[in-house]
Image (cartoon, helix red, strand yellow):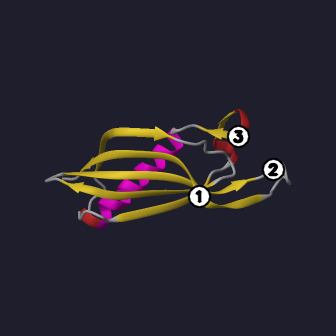
């Protein structure tokens, strides 16, 4: 796996994933996306899905809500013999605006950083 390799996934956050008042989604939603991004990074660079070993840091910066479109990105920042350190970010790129109309939404420019983390994966 080479340092600097980047993978990005975008996903619509369904209303069925809201767990809290105001349509808030739990922080584990972004962590699940980070796992998917890490898997693709490992496949692309090592030819194996790898195993997620853990996080050294996680910061929840802004809320993710049902109706959002989020972008999860991972960048390899360190390569060991079997371990790879990845910096992750999850940003809201579109947000529902139901106060305007039930199905209304807007593009956020710039995107809103919601979660950032550093994780370590291990490949055989």
Q: Which residues are magenta?
A: 28-44
Instruction: Say whether disc 1 or disc 3 marks the residue closer to the N-terminus.
Output: 3
- Residues at discs 1 and 2 in contact (Cβ within 8 Å): no
Q: Report helix, strand or loop for mark 3.
A: helix
- Position of the N terminus, as image quadrant, is bottom left
**20 sits to left or right of 97:** left
Q: Report helix, strand or loop for mark 1.
A: strand
Badge 1 density bin: few <14, some 14–19, many ≥20, Cα 10 Å = some
- Residues at discs 2 and 3 in contact (Cβ within 8 Å): no
Q: Main secondary structure of the magenta part?
A: helix
Query: In this figure, which residue is indicated by the disc labeled 1?
Result: 111
Separation of marks 1 and 2 at Cα, in angstroms? 19 Å
Of the numbered discs in the image, which one, if any, rests on residue 98?
A: 2
**28 sits to left or right of 95:** left
Instruction: Check residue 38 for magenta coloring.
Output: yes
Seen as rendered, the residue at the extreme right is 101
| Residue at left offset 75%, top offset 58% | 105
Badge 2 density bin: few <14, some 14–19, many ≥20, Cα 10 Å = few
Instruction: Say whether disc 1 or disc 2 marks the residue closer to the N-terminus.
Output: 2
12, above or below 114, in the image = below
Q: Position of residue 94 (x, y in %)?
A: 66, 58
Please identify the quarter of the rendering in which residue 110 is found. Answer: bottom right
Badge 3 density bin: few <14, some 14–19, many ≥20, Cα 10 Å = some
Of the numbered discs in the image, which one, if any, rests on residue 23?
A: 3
């Amino acid at each position: 796996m080479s340092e600097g390799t980047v993978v990005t996934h975008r996903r619509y956050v369904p209303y069925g994933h809201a767990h809290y008042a105001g349509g808030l989604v739990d922080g584990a939603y972004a962590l699940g996306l980070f796992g998917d991004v890490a898997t693709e990074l490992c496949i692309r660079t090592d030819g194996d899905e790898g195993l997620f070993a853990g996080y050294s840091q996680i910061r929840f910066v802004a809320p993710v809500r049902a109706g959002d479109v989020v972008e999860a990105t991972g960048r390899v920042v360190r390569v060991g013999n079997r371990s790879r350190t990845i910096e992750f970010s999850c940003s809201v790129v579109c947000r529902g605006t139901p106060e305007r109309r039930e199905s209304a939404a807007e593009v956020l420019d710039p995107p809103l950083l919601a979660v950032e983390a550093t994780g370590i994966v291990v490949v055989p």
